[in-house]
Image (spheres, rainbow, N blue to C red):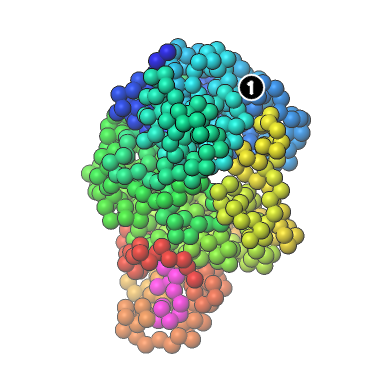
Amino acid sequence: MNGVALVAMPWAAPETPSIQIGLLGAVLARAEMPATAHSLHLEVTGFFVGKGVALEHVEAVSHQWWRVGLGEWIFASAASGDSCGDDGEYLRYLASERVPAELVVAAQRMRESVPDFLRQAAAEILASAPRVVGFTNTFAQTLPSLALAAQIKAADPQVVIVFGGANCDGLLGQALLATHALVDFVVQGRAEGLLPRLCRALLAGRPPAAEPGLLGRALADPAASVTNAASAEHTGHAAPAHADWFRPDYDEYYRRLEQSAVREALLPRTRLVIETARGCWWGEYQHCTFCGLNGSAMAFKSATAEQVLTDIDALATRYKRTEFDVVDNILDPTFFDHVLPELARRRRDQIDYRFFWEIKANLSAQQVRLLRDAGVQRIQPGIESLSTRILRLMLKGVTALQNVKLLVFAASNDLMVTWNIIYGIPGETEDDYQAMAEMIPSLVHLKPPGLVRLQVQRFSPYFDQPAAHGLRLVGPAPYYRHLYAVDPARLPDLAYAFEHDYLDGHDPERAVAPVRRALEHWDRSWSPGKHHSLRYERGPGFLRLRERRPGFRPRDILLDQVEAELYLACRTVATPAAAVAAVERACQVRLGIDEVRRFLVELSEGRLLLREHDRFLALALPLNPDADPPATPATKWKLSREPAH
């Protein structure tokens, strides 16, 4: 036996390579350790399509329905060797969650063919006679990985099985090791430093030394065990120094894609994956109450500008792709000073890089324009709500008007926004959602959100201190009992998502009902483009507002120079006093604040401005955003880290 096999199982996105095995493959290569990569999240896609499953159904399982455990259920019986609970009960649960019936049929077909796929996958991996097989385990990969690990162990009990990834953090990793004897070691936190030492020992046939971040039954230190306290809060979570950043190796993914049955469908949509920062700088300052994404790895660290730009160029050159998904939880604000301006320069040099990035919503117009100029085409700004009161309950650090302002800026610059409204936040009221529903008709020219009920996640403040937030945890999300054949008492330790009750008896479905109705209308009526929008165009001494939103009477509204300047002063959210100050500077006139307030209120009643108390936001998009300079300089990032009041 020789070498290491690194495996990415479904349900990672098949149109992107696994950055986890790409990075760890590069780490082991630098350590001069033999390793093979196995992008089985891609392989399974072609396999299922070959079994008559539509590609759209495979991708729906991968991208959309992880919140109901559908992808893991497909592999659950293979992982446990038996059915886990009542399949009929699980199918009824899927129906209650509005999973499309045709997708459920496709999932059942996939489940029936899983044993054949596992035999094929195990044969592929064992062909290189690895001593160590490492599985990356994030989101919906646990059961598929356990299923394949069981197949490999059955064929060769001497293979050492190692699990790592976000699903192995904290108690999750301890429980995985305690409940599944086929797992030999669990790596918690960043694996770049630890993995070469672990593999070197295992390839040499000796037990590895105990160290923070490593769980296992066969450690050299007999005092180390599955419950080693040091492993739960270990220093391995600290973000790496700049010298420890690695460029991922995606050679195996693209070789496999060339041979895949779904090559023609996926290749045009393939995107490179890159990591430029780890952790969350906002979470370090103030942890959003609902968020469990970072686990115990909240510390924020980013790569140097030189590293980021060099890696982008090198990956694009090697794989002949120009579209990137950046997997950071949040954009490093210092990138506005160096990385993004340099990417914008490269686009001016006709290098057509395109990016997806997750951002914080409190950006200025200048910063959003820089994102566009740098090639950022898709963003996920973490908006979560259009109620300032609910946003404060979430500790989001932004207001509703700031969130809408970001949507306006993004639409002005043709950035596609992925965003949701999360409901069921402890402390929300029916009045909050009634006010939100009344706001929504003003926004129908902007991209609508998804509507997602709160799911309590492990590692979030809601999970860690439920009672302090008015919650009582009931137990793991209902689908878990259909996934794991373990002692029910251990099931909560394996779960990431949990059901909950409200200590005050709050009914979130009743509260959100008016917003749900308003969003259904928004979804039906929205379409991108200038012909279904609210826009402004500027002329000499006037501004024309062109009302073309769905549900509104088409009309043009002319504003004279002073009125135009008052409207434009509200592009970045303004009080009447601030609007007066801006216009008096621009037009050399004297205005009364009460008179201006009446004018702004009149425009907000016509849904041309959005009003929150005595603050106003312009909703119209510029006809020519490039000729429309930001009303204010770029926000100072030192200030933008502070919570909104």
Q: Could you tell me if residue 111 is visible in this image?
A: no
- Badge 1 marks a residue whose secondary structure is helix
Question: To which quarter of the image does residue 504 belong?
Answer: bottom right
- Locate the N terminus by quadrant: top left
Q: In this view, does 186 lie above or below 548?
A: above
Q: Could you tell me if residue 469 is visible in this image?
A: yes
Number of marks in the image? 1
Q: In this view, does 232 lie above or below 218?
A: below
Image point (45%, 70%), residue name: 573
Q: Say which amino acid is labelled 1.
A: Ala
Q: In this view, does 422 lie above or below 234?
A: below
Instruction: Give x and y (percent) for residue 320.
Output: 31, 30
Front residue of this view, candidates 147 and 112: 147
Q: Give the range drawn in magenta.
A: 569-580
Instruction: Give x and y (percent) for residue 602.
Output: 53, 77
Front residue of this view, candidates 276 and 358: 276
